[in-house]
Amino acid sequence: MKASFVTVTCALLLSSASPSLAATYSLTDTIVGSSFYSAFDWQNIADPTHGRVNYVDQTTSRNQNLTYASSDTFILRTDFRTVLNPSGPGRNSVRIRTKKTYTNHVAVFNVRHLPQGCGTWPAIWETKEAGWPNGGETDIMEGVNDQGPNAATLHTVAGCTMPEPRAQSGRVQHHFLRHLDCNWLVNGNAGCGVRFPTGNSYGPPFNNNGGGWYVIERTPTYIKVWFWARNDGSVPAEVRNGLGQVNPNNWGVPAAYFPDTSCRIPNFFQEHNIIINLTLCGDWAGSVYGQSGCPSTCVDYVNNNPAAFQNAYFNFASIRVYQ
Ligand SMILES: *[C@@H]1O[C@H](CO)[C@@H](O)[C@H](O)[C@H]1NC(C)=O
Ligand SMILES: *[C@@H]1O[C@H](CO)[C@@H](O)[C@H](O)[C@H]1NC(C)=O
């Protein structure tokens, strides 16, 4: 713990002395196809957000084809064959967490398809689960019930707020109040979210367009999240082609920008795992299920309509991490 604190402090001093030093990152992890099985742990835990899912272990997910890998594809899905007993466990699904942790880094998620359908709540995010929320949380991709656009959000302990306006193409979330305080104790842990500018950043429009790239850059002085749709001509070649080095300084304005104006990043964000989870219903998808135009009640729908979850899958082309 002490060693990593020292590292962070040095990086901070360096970056304030000459910010351009931090611009170029080198590829450290390429996660493609079956390497998802070695890069991630399968977390067969109770869903902390009370979803109607049963997270299974790796052996079960492979046996039931809930995860599937080929040379250039990794699929992660919920079961879509079983009618559930209402008093039994939820629909089988998968939650995976990287074995490695990251502080300053760029991660490029090349995604072809996101889970879709009423009741679905997929997420790609980073956090330190032990002691949460002391180590902070960054949600890169998250949504419910096919309702786009994507939102990127920070969750922290008290003391981290965001300025407005700031240099981003997305819009600050608001629901009565603007979400500028990242403190988990404010607004029922809504966090300081930013909605992306384009509808094809989430749900059926994302899938119909062949997906795209979500990218996070975390430094000691800011966190940025970009999104490029599959057919967006402005996607940087180094992102599109998974090159060995990337330089986010050349990428222009991000969809979401979280500067350290009044949030000292190293004080609120520790070493993070990348987590990918797919729940159904639960605290968020369940609570806005009806107003999303979805039929029946969320739990009944999940229990009784397995075929409705045929498209409730992630298709990853790759995850590349740069440091
Ligand atoms: C397993 O899933 C993959 C990807 O969705 C699919 O191509 C394959 O046909 C499935 N295998 C079986 C036995 O269902
Ligand atoms: C994934 O798990 C975390 C809790 O550990 C939760 O905050 C998040 O909402 C979950 N998301 C999904 C989509 O399951």
Image (cartoon, rainbow, N blue to C red):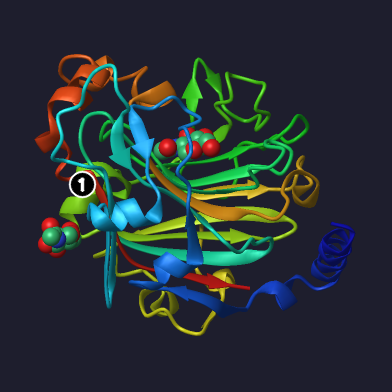
Res 272 quadrant in image: bottom right
The residue sitting at 65% across, 74% down in the picture is 23
The residue sitting at 52% across, 48% down in the picture is 256
The N terminus lies in which quarter of the figure?
A: bottom right
Residue designated by label 1: 205
Image position, residue 30 (x, y; %)? 46, 76
Find ligand 1 in the image and state its quadrant.
Answer: bottom left
Direction from residue 116 to residue 195 in the image, left or right: right
**Secondary structure under badge 1?**
helix
The C terminus lies in which quarter of the figure?
A: bottom right
Q: What residue type is labelled 1?
A: Pro
Tag 1: Cα neighbours inside 10 Å, few (<14), some, or many (≥20)?
Answer: some
| Foreground residue among 106 and 318 | 318
Q: In this view, does 271 lie above or below 43?
A: below
Image position, residue 320 (x, y; %)? 47, 71
Direction from residue 21 to residue 201 in the image, left or right: left
**Does ligand 2 reach within 8 Å of label 1's beta carbon?**
no
Q: In this view, does 85 lie above or below 115?
A: above
Image position, residue 62 (x, y; %)? 29, 58
Direction from residue 264 to residue 310 in the image, left or right: left
